Amino acid sequence: MIGRLNHVAIAVPDLEAATATYRDTLGAKVSPPQEEPDHGVTVVFIELPNTKIELLEPLGENSPIQAFLDRSPSGGIHHVCYEVDDIISARDRLKEQGARVLGNGEPKVGAHGKPVLFLHPKDFNGTLVELEQA
Amino acid sequence: MIGRLNHVAIAVPDLEAATATYRDTLGAKVSPPQEEPDHGVTVVFIELPNTKIELLEPLGENSPIQAFLDRSPSGGIHHVCYEVDDIISARDRLKEQGARVLGNGEPKVGAHGKPVLFLHPKDFNGTLVELEQA
């Protein structure tokens, strides 16, 4: 069912510093920052040849990554995102097997303009999993 | 400098259960478990179209992932691995810029038979970074 790894998301307390680390120290190609107010984050994409790293900084009140940074002030790997061909059939298959979908269970439009869902970390080895329609 | 994302490693307390989750619930292609006594882990590879997920379970005494699982008993994302063309020149460039290389600074042979190094998480936004020679 799952296809490509769309991205790995890393929560960071200081997006400018993290951008400099990836651009200057690791020599990667880094996009300009993009504000995603609907998701409560500012995002920078690290473009690797086969996938992307997303650096996430909290934006506004009630950012969904603030609690993560409160626990891990230096930042850390926040989630992985797998692509699926059909997000509704993927969701239904996962729910049948007892996996919990976060929120109200309906896909939202993600940072790439495509429908996304998040799955409960307790059902996936402590890993927050995002599914994105390919 | 960094190239492809070689893999994302997820530490798990129960490799058989995690394998079943990826194979049966997420419908992914999963390799048989492989013991890596030199690295203190048993590994299962999840083969995605563009990269791999490695599930890691502690093996033997003093496994390097045991402390991580003591802090996060359900498991969690442990590290990301980026490919580099020349691991010695990558290491020297990183050290010049003040990044800390773990261990004695010399590459070891990793799970894929290629030289690898680990970089200090405090220098990379709380993220343990492995470099592997491509």
Image (cartoon, coloured by chain):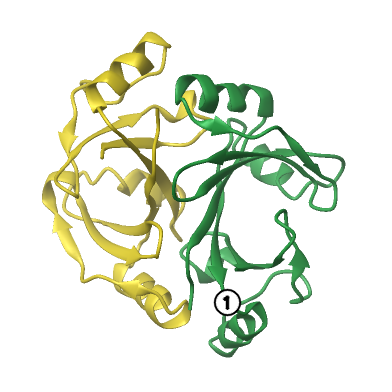
Chain colours: A green, B yellow
Residue A112 x/y as whole percent: 70, 56
What amino acid type should be assigned to the residue bearing mark 1? Asp
Instruction: Work out which residue is located at the far front of the displayed protein and give it.
Output: A49
Residue A131 x/y as whole percent: 60, 67
Q: Residues within 10 Å of mark 1 (few under 14, many from 20)?
A: some
Q: Quadrant of residue A86?
A: bottom right
Residue at the spot x=47%, y=69% of the render?
Answer: A3
Image position of A57 (left or right of B97): right
Residue B110 x/y as whole percent: 19, 43
Residue at the spot x=55%, y=67% of the render?
Answer: A83
In the picture, which quadrant includes the C terminus of chain A?
bottom right
Instruction: Work out which residue is located at the far bottom of the displayed protein and give it.
Output: A96
Q: Give the vertical position of B113 relative to B75 (above or below).
A: above
Q: Which residue is mark 1?
A: A85
Is residue A14 something one can see in this rendering? no
Chain at tag 1: A
Residue at the spot x=30%, y=26% of the render?
Answer: B102
Helix, strand or loop at label 1? It is: loop
Number of numbered discs visible in the structure rendering: 1
Q: Nearer the viewer, residue A132 or B106?
A: A132
Residue at the spot x=72%, y=53% of the render?
Answer: A111
